[in-house]
Image (cartoon, rainbow, N blue to C red):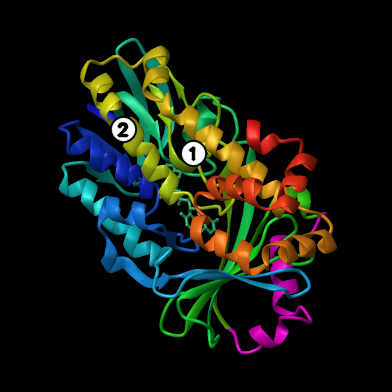
Amino acid sequence: MYQVVIIGAGPIGGRLATELASRGISTLMIEEHAEIGRPFQCAGLVNPPAMQMVGLEDTILQNVDGALMHSPSGIMLPVGKDGRVRTHVVCRKKFDQAVVAQAMEAGAHLWLLSKPIDAEVVKDGVNIKIEREGEIVDLKCNLLIGADGAHSWTRRYFKMGRPKEMMIGFQTDVSGLSGKDNWLEMYTGRDIAPGLFAWVIPTGNNTHRIGVWSRPQDLDGRSVEECYDSLISHPLWKKRFAKAKEIARYCGPVPCGTIRKPFKDRVMVIGDAAGMAKPTTGGGIGPGFRQVEAIIEKLVEAVNKDKLDASNLSSVCKPFKAFRKEQDRARALRDLLVRIPDDEELDSHFRMFNRPEVLELINEVGDIEHPVPLGMTLLRKVPEFRKLAVKAGFKLLFA
Ligand SMILES: Cc1cc2nc3c(=O)[nH]c(=O)nc-3n(C[C@H](O)[C@H](O)[C@H](O)COP(=O)(O)OP(=O)(O)OC[C@H]3O[C@@H](n4cnc5c(N)ncnc54)[C@H](O)[C@@H]3O)c2cc1C
């Protein structure tokens, strides 16, 4: 018997378990894999506020001060400033393991090689059948939380709907590439990353992560892997990637669009399971940590009072509404600026931004993690951008 059982010991499950256990809630994490942090499917970018929450600076491989953004025809937009850290690149395995270790230090328990096969909500709790190292174990808890990632068993089992968008990401680790150590690169264009972008992220010691992400409906039957091949063999960029030697490759989903009701009686989902990743960057760690922070006090109170029916959990999850709104506005901004089928039009946006006064504005207000304030400033100060927003039906302003 536990007060809370969390399915999934990823970064969000681990973070939530830390916060619950450190407030005296008996918590068990159930993880299907034999070790934490594997398989690895992430570019490893963790923003400074999220890093501050966990204090895991020893997992940082590289700090990033800015991004060199490339238009389809090769216009380059530098966004950032040397010496001002915008984000960190972490070793995801070490990071996830350390987050889960913090939960265990706080008193949470962890079962590896375990997964749920059945769950039933009854009046006084949730009865769960867990397959643990090949054996079936019966468990009971007051609250079941799914932090079990993009394809969440919990979300599917309790029929809680689907995230609005499910992007696909593909990434390789390479050695042999040179470049500006503290800057990441972004590449755009129909051939390379229709509707979104490709990235090159320095990971220290002359290694990099090269990745692409896109929405399935924008791919026109191609795979993201084919997009990746288009990037490294593109006439404009093939010289850049000629010396890259592949060490590993992986592919994974990125759910962006918080589900409407991430709760039912005695059940809730969080993190990727609830579709919390950012539609502009695909980042899910920062938003997931913020989600935990936003609900923890009310959640602990609800668990302690055993007030865990859907209406109580709806009140606990109220802050998610603001998250969803923020996601919707960021998505509108992304669609306005990047999800453009025509490369020439995309180029014209780069031209608009590539003026000293606009670049200065971007560097002053711009934050890829929080693009909406920048969008609003551009609306006020850059006439061409205003025209664009009008074209988009002011979705941005009123979303
Ligand atoms: C290519 C790519 C690049 C990305 N880059 C970034 C980035 O740079 N920065 C960033 O912030 N985010 C990035 N993301 C997104 C990020 O990886 C996720 O948002 C983040 O991992 C979400 O954490 P989570 O704990 O919710 O889910 P997950 O990390 O998916 O963890 C879920 C855990 O649950 C376990 N699990 C799943 N099902 C079960 C089950 N039935 N039973 C038991 N255990 C189960 C899994 O094994 C896993 O350990 C990227 C994603 C992709 C695909």
- Residue 134 image point, x, y percent: 37, 44
- 139 sits left or right of 399 in the view: left
- How far apart marks 1 and 2 lie (CA) works out to 15 Å
The dot on residue 273 is 1
The reply to whether the magenta stretch includes residue 114 is no
Q: Quadrant of residue 301?
A: top left
Which residue corresponds to the image point at 72% horizontal and 84% vertical from the top-left?
238
Which residue corresponds to the image point at 76% horizontal and 69% vertical from the top-left?
72
Q: Is mark 1 within 8 Å of ligand 1?
A: yes
Quadrant of the drawing holding the N terminus: top left
Q: What amino acid does circle 1 point to?
A: Ala
Q: Quadrant of residue 289?
A: top left
- Residue 5 image point, x, y percent: 31, 32
- The residue closer to the viewer here, 233 or 336, is 336
Q: Is residue 258 visible?
A: no
- The residue closer to the viewer here, 92 or 189, is 189
- 1 sits left or right of 332 in the view: left
Q: Quadrant of residue 73?
A: bottom right
- Residue 352 image point, x, y percent: 73, 62
Select label 1 or label 2 by which is in front. 1
